[in-house]
Image: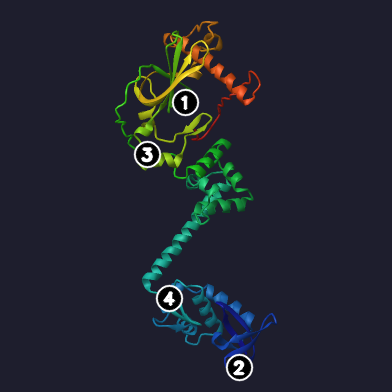
C-alpha cells in the first residue's frame, strides 16, 4: 500500500509501513522513513508505483482546462476526488484524482483551500479580478522581455531612459524598467552600466556624475515652489555714496558692494555694503524654509544652483541703478598712513552706480593702470573715472594683505593661486 500525503503544502508519496491511531510510518522513495499524521494522508493506492503515478498525474494536470474545471466543480466545499469525477469521469482513476489535486493546488485564484485536500470555488468577481491581474502580469512580462531585447541590441527604450538614474542609483527592484535592465545584462553577459552606455542611455561621464549629484542632493528637482518676494518696508536713510560691485559675469546674487569718500582730503572713508534681505524675510516663512533647506547656493565650474529663485534674488540684489537696502560698514583711514581712525555700521539704502564684471575688465584694469604707470587704452569713460578710487582700494588691499601675512607668518609676497575652470564638449541636458 502506498500513501499520498501533504507535508507543509508539498505533496509526497511513499510506501506505508505501519499505521497507528493518529499516525503512519511511511518509507519515501529515497529510503528515508518518516512519521506522517493520519490527517495529512490524502490518498491510499496500490498501483501504479508512486513515481509513475506522479509523472502521469503531472502530465494530466498540465492538460486540464482551469476554466472548465472551475465550471464543473461543485458550488459547495468539495474534495479533489469530487472534482476528478466531475471533470474526468465518475470512475476517475488514481492518476486522474491526483491530477485534479495538482490542478487545485496550483490554481489558488480559482480554488481556495478549505482543509487538507478540500477546496471551495473562489467567488466569480474575485476570480475575475485575479485573472485580470494575472493577464496584466503576463503583458508586463512581455513588455519587460521586449525592453530587454532592445537593450541587448544596443537601443534604450524610452521608459528605461526616463527611469535611468533611479535604476542605477536607487532601484526599485520590482519596477519593470529595472527588471528589463537586469534581464538584458544577464542575457548579454554585460554589466548594467556598460549595457546602458552601449545602448546610448549615458552620453557622457559628465552627464552621469551630474545626474548622480542631482539624484543624491536634489531628489525632488532643483526647481522652486511659487514664492513671492516680500517688500522691504523699513524707512531707511539714503546713503550719500555711489557704490559699485565687483563680480564675475555669472554672478546674479550681487550681495556686496564698495564705495569711497574723501579721496584727496587726507581722511578717506571706505564703505562695505552688504545686501539685507533679512529685513523682509520673516522666520518660518515660505522663503525662509526654502533657504534653510538649501542653506547655500551650489557652485560648480560654469554653473550654479541658487539657494533661492531668481525672482526673489533680483528683489534684493545690489543692482546698478537702484537704491538697495544694505548693512554698511564705514571704515575711515588716514590717507597717508592707511591707519584706521574710525568705524561705524549703519542700516540704510545704498545707491548702486555700477556692477563691474572683472572677467570683462581683466585687460583694462591692470596693475600698471591701478598704479598709474600706464593708461587703460580701451577703458570706457565710466571705468576711467573710477581709476583713482580703484587705485586707492588696490593700495589699501596690498597694505592689509601685508599686515595679514605678518600675523600669519606667511612669506613676503606670498600669493595664493586662483584657478578658473571651464568645461568644454559637454553633451546631453547637463549645465
Query: Do labels 4 and 2 touch, CB within 8 Å?
Result: no
**Viewer-proximal residue among 424 and 200:** 424
Q: Which residue is mark 1?
A: 250
Query: Do labels 2 and 3 touch, CB within 8 Å?
Result: no
Q: Earlier in the sequence, mark 3 or mark 4?
A: 4
Q: CA distance from mark 1 to mark 3?
A: 23 Å
**Viewer-proximal residue among 94 and 22:** 22
Q: How is the image coloured?
A: rainbow
Element assignment for label 3: helix
Q: Mark 2: few, some, or many residues within 10 Å (few <14, many ≥20)?
A: few
Q: Mark 1: few, some, or many residues within 10 Å (few <14, many ≥20)?
A: few
Element assignment for label 1: loop
The location of residue 260, given as percent across then percent down, is 43, 15
Q: Earlier in the sequence, mark 1 or mark 4?
A: 4
Q: CA distance from mark 3 to mark 4?
A: 63 Å
Disc on res. 51: none
Q: Earlier in the sequence, mark 4 or mark 2?
A: 2
Q: Which residue is mark 4?
A: 70
Q: Which residue is mark 2?
A: 20
Amino acid at each position: 500500500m502506498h500513501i499520498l500525503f501533504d507535508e507543509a503544502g508539498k505533496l509526497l508519496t511513499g510506501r506505508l509501513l505501519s499505521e497507528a491511531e493518529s499516525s503512519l510510518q511511511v518509507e519515501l522513495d529515497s529510503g528515508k522513513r518518516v512519521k506522517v499524521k493520519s490527517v495529512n494522508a490524502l490518498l491510499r493506492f496500490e498501483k501504479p508505483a508512486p513515481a509513475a503515478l506522479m509523472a502521469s498525474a503531472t502530465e494530466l494536470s498540465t492538460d486540464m482546462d482551469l476554466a472548465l474545471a472551475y465550471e464543473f466543480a461543485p458550488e459547495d466545499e468539495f474534495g479533489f476526488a469530487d472534482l476528478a469525477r466531475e471533470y474526468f469521469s465518475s470512475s476517475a482513476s488514481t492518476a486522474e484524482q491526483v491530477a485534479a489535486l495538482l490542478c487545485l493546488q496550483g490554481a489558488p485564484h480559482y480554488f481556495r483551500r478549505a482543509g487538507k485536500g478540500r477546496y471551495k470555488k473562489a467567488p466569480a468577481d474575485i476570480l475575475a479580478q485575479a485573472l485580470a491581474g494575472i493577464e496584466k502580469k503576463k503583458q508586463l512580462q512581455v513588455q519587460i522581455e521586449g525592453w530587454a531585447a532592445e537593450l541587448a541590441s544596443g537601443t534604450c527604450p524610452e521608459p528605461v531612459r526616463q527611469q535611468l538614474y533611479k535604476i542605477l542609483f536607487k532601484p526599485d527592484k520590482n519596477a519593470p524598467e529595472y527588471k528589463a535592465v537586469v534581464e538584458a545584462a544577464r542575457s548579454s553577459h554585460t554589466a548594467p552600466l556598460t549595457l546602458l552606455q552601449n545602448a546610448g542611455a549615458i552620453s557622457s561621464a559628465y552627464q552621469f556624475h551630474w545626474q548622480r549629484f542631482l539624484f543624491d542632493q536634489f531628489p525632488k528637482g532643483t526647481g522652486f515652489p511659487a514664492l513671492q518676494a516680500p517688500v522691504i518696508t523699513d524707512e531707511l536713510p539714503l546713503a550719500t555714496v555711489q557704490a559699485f560691485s565687483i563680480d564675475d559675469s555669472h554672478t546674479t546674487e550681487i550681495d556686496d558692494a564698495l564705495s569711497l569718500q574723501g579721496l584727496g582730503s587726507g581722511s578717506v572713508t571706505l564703505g562695505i555694503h552688504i545686501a539685507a534681505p533679512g529685513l523682509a524675510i520673516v522666520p518660518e516663512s515660505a522663503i525662509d524654509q526654502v533657504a534653510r533647506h538649501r542653506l547655500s547656493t551650489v557652485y560648480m565650474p560654469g554653473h550654479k544652483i541658487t539657494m533661492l529663485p531668481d525672482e526673489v534674488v533680483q528683489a534684493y540684489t545690489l543692482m546698478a541703478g537702484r537704491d538697495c537696502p544694505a548693512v554698511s560698514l564705514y571704515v575711515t583711514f588716514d590717507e597717508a598712513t592707511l591707519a584706521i581712525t574710525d568705524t561705524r555700521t549703519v542700516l540704510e539704502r545704498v545707491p548702486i552706480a555700477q556692477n563691474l564684471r572683472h572677467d570683462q575688465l581683466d585687460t583694462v584694469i591692470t596693475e600698471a593702470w591701478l598704479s598709474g604707470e600706464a593708461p587703460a587704452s580701451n577703458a570706457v569713460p565710466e571705468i576711467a573715472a573710477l581709476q583713482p578710487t580703484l587705485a586707492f582700494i588696490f593700495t589699501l588691499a596690498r597694505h592689509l594683505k601685508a599686515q595679514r601675512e605678518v600675523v600669519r607668518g606667511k612669506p613676503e609676497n606670498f600669493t595664493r593661486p586662483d584657478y578658473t575652470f571651464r568645461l568644454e564638449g559637454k553633451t546631453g541636458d547637463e549645465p
